[in-house]
Every structure is written in structure tokens, then in C-alpha cells.
Amino acid sequence: MKSRFAPSPTGYLHIGGARTALFAWAWAKKQQGNFVLRIEDTDKERSTQASVDAILDGMNWLGLDYDEGPFYQTQRFERYKVVVEQLLDEKKAYYCECSKERLDGLRETLMQKGEKAMYDGCCRGKKLSSGVVRFKNPTDGIVVFNDAVKGKISIANKEIDDLIIARSDGTPTYNLTVVVDDHDMAISHVIRGDDHINNTPRQINLYQALDWNLPEFAHLPMILGSDGARLSKRHGAVSVMAYRDAGFLPEALLNYLVRLGWSHGDQEIFSLDEIVALFDLKDINKAPASFNEEKLLWLNQDYIKNATPECLIQHLGWHLNNQKVETDNGADLSLVVKSLQERSKTLVEMVEGLKMFYQAFDEFDRKLANKQFKDKVPLEALLEKLSQLEVWQANEIKVVIKQVCDDLGIGFGKVGQPFRLALSGNGNAGSIDLVAELIGKPTTLKRLDKAIKYAC
RNA sequence: GUCGCCUUCGUCUAUCGGUUAGGACCCCAGGUUUUCAUCCUGGUAAGAGGAGUUCGAUUCUCCUAGGCGAUGCCA
């Protein structure tokens, strides 16, 4: 058993492509088969090396490893040429020299008559020896195939025209290369977006002309934007790497993506192992799904909450570097991360929350400071008592805060809140005693002092 | 226009003809909590429309509508 992901390198790896890759990957793993990566770069005009790199990076970040490839179609032109020659020799294909003008005119006339726009086979019997090469599609009968997700699909041959399999410059086109490659690479399951359903009958006819066995087809519904329109840039990030940049964990993205069009009862959280163990083509939905970032965010938060600090630190590396946050000198990073796990929806948020442990802030949030620092007495009491504290630990610090509360006859909030602001600068911090412990005694005292000065 | 595919809460989905149509996200209301967050409890919310088959349709068939896709010397 073998499946493949065959993107064309005309842009970054996007969400839809990633989901297709994930499904093909999961199905291969589940069957203990191979997963192949093939770059469909026959369109030299639009294919770029940068896009190839972007796709490879995306696959790598997601952790979708391939057993074979990446194969490049541009390196297999000789092979396609042989197949095209064979079809020509067997009179299953022919040269066509129709001009663009004629084709355009034909299309317009047919559309006006309310008919389907398609090539009329004008050059079929002309025995030309140059131009594009067209495949002689059967003129009658119907093509029926059983799609693993859509079920039985049938299209009449009279709806299909003679497709171009080689351009006038001799290079092969998609419908030819995909068939040759899937055959040569022994792909048993063609899992791809359902925008290819219409191509499938053409391809099946090619398989038959070549006398090759058909693979299984599974056409995945598209992913739409939140407004039901096809996912595009205006819906926000569509590039997989943009999600890395926004602070998502690859496992969370994968988990979100696998639930888009696939389900296993009421289960929402799936580890990679569970995806592989439970995935099944028969559980894939037929209808397109809308991308919902809020649910992705919820999943990401859940993954952050439950990850080990070590794992998070690994993923945090890129962000720390990106935001130039130096964590070597200062609090124990894994303790800081741990304190932030329940309050970060993304790694970007986590980096924000972590800065206070490693960097000084310029000034306090004005609005909050005006409110919290109105009375400097609690701050002075804290500074006084904490500077005398010898064992710098959260529980000891907590005792001191309580003491201050008792001494002044005020509630915890009246002391804890100003303290929190004094240490964080913006009030965004967790358990205040732990925060103080991690920040360390010198810095804590320094910031308290700064807060008192602000209060004056 | 033509052909193909699709249609359950706002969103992701469960349901293998008989259910008070279930779960999750979001949202709302409570509770826990040293802010925020986490966590817990509860709530709002759905079978596109119309025929038919059937004792009984969300589930099967057909029609309509709507959406998406294809209609490229793109993939």
C-alpha cells in the first residue's frame, strides 16, 4: 500500500494542502505502507525553488515524514516523452494545431448555445506531426468509479474532450504526468482534494489506454474560510508556517486539521499515534468544512497546557530568537514556562508573559499604575519586609504578603495586585508569590522600589 | 451556460429508519481562585425547501434552491 502527496510548487504549503498531506500520511502509516512526496513542477512558468523549499519546510515542521521522495516531475521528462510517443504510435493520441483564437471562438459559440465548452476534436483525423498532443478520449460510454469518500461517481465520456497531454514545446501536462507517476511509483491510494474529481475520469481513460491498473481514489472535500468561501489570504493566515510564527504547536495544528472532515465519534483530542491508529478513509466527510481559528486556539491552549516544559522550550526556541529574548541569565526557564502553561493560548503569548523574568520594562501601564499605586504604604511595607526575608521561596513570600495584609488590616487584593503590577509592569502575571520567587530577590526589591518612586 | 460534487446548532461533528437529535469550539449565567487564566456546573442553538417510499424518516429515492468545483498549451 502506498499513498502520496503531490503539491505543485507555486506557493507556500497552505492549510488545505497540509490537511491533504496529513490524511494521505495517516492512511499510509495506518496501513503500514509508504508515503511518497512528489513535487509536480511541470509548469515551469509558475514553479519556483523557493516554493519547493517552503513546502519542504512546512512538511518538516509539521512532522509529516515521507518514506520516498521528494521526486520531481521535471526530472522525469524522458519517461513522459516515452509514454506520449507510445500513445501516438498506438493512435491513442494525436497532434493538434488549433490556434488559440479558434479555441476561444469555439468555446464562446458553445457557451452561447448553452452547451459545455470543450474541444471539438477538429484535428483528430488530420495526421499532423507537430503542435500539442491530445489524448483521444472515448466518445461514448460512461466512466464510473467508486470514490473512497464520495462513493459512486459517474461521468459520461461525451462530457469529456480530448485533453492536451503535451504542450507544443513538448513538455507534458498534469493529467499525463500524474497518471504516469502514480503508476510508476505504484501508488495504490490517490488521496487528493475534490477539485480533482473532474480530472479523474480523464485520468481513468488514460490508465485504460495504457492498460494500467487503477489505484483507489479518495477525494477530500475542500476547506473553506469562515465565510464559506474558498480559503484565501483574506481569511487570515493560510500558510502553514504562518501558524508556526503565530505560536501554534504543530501537534495542535495537525489535531485541528484532522478533525476537519474526519471524526472518530465524539473524540476531539488526538495524539499523532492516535491519528495513525484510528484514521480511516470511511470516516471522512463528504461536505466541505470551514476553518475556525477559535477552535484551533482552544486546541493549541490545551496542547500547551499539557505539554512538558522541555517540549515547549524546544518549540519556544524559534520565538525567543525571533523576539530576541535572552533567557540564559535569570530564572530557570523550565520553571517559568511551567508557570505560564495555563495562561498561554499561543507560544507568542507565552514569550510575552516570559519577558518580565528576563528583561526590565521601561514603565508601568499608566492606567493600572494610577489605580494600583495610589497608596504606596503596602508597597513600602512589602519592600521593608521582603528585604529582610532570607529564604526566598514562594511560600515564605506568601507569608510576608499575608503579614502585610494583617498589619495594615486590608485584604489580599490590596497588596497582591499592586505587587503584581510592580513586578510585571502590566499586571499580567500568575501566582504572585511564585512570580516573585522566580524573578529573584534583587529584581523584586528593585521593582518594588521603582513602583514606590512612581507612586510619589 | 454546461457537467460534477455537496447540504444536521454560528463553526467542527455524532447518528449505520424508531433518540427528549449527542459531543466539542464560541457565547451567556453561576461556582472555585491572590488579578488574568485554568478548572467545575448549567444554559442558548440544528436536520435548506418540497414530494415520494415506509407503520415510522435527519437517515432511502426524486425534484427545487443554495454552495463549492470543473469547464486552461495550471495543477
Image (cartoon, rainbow, N blue to C red):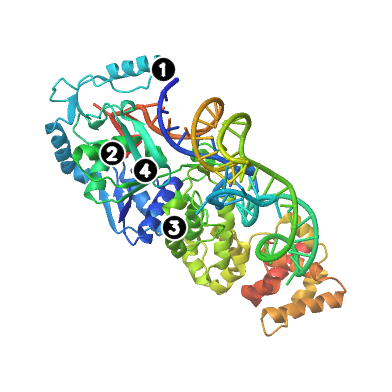
Q: Which residue does the numbered mark 2 point to in the structure image? A: A204
Q: Amino acid at mark 2?
A: Ile
Which element carries disc 4, helix, strand or loop? Answer: strand
Q: Which residue is mark 4?
A: A146
Labels 1, 4: one chain = yes
Cα distance between the residues tagged 3 and 2: 27 Å
Q: Does any portion of residue A45 appear in the rendered image?
A: no
Circle 1: residue type:
Gly
Between marks 1 and 3, how big is the CA–CA gap?
A: 44 Å
Mark nearer the N terminus (1 vs 4): 1
Of mark 4 and mark 3, the one earlier in the sequence is: 4
Would you say A423 lies left or right of A182 here?
Answer: right
Helix, strand or loop under label 3:
loop
Q: Separation of disc 2 and disc 4 at Cα? A: 12 Å
Q: Secondary structure at mark 2?
A: helix
Circle 3 chain: A
Q: Which mark is residue A279?
A: 3
Chain ID at mark 2:
A
Q: Position of residue A193 (x, y in %)?
A: 40, 43
Q: Mark 3 or mark 2: which comes first in sequence?
A: 2
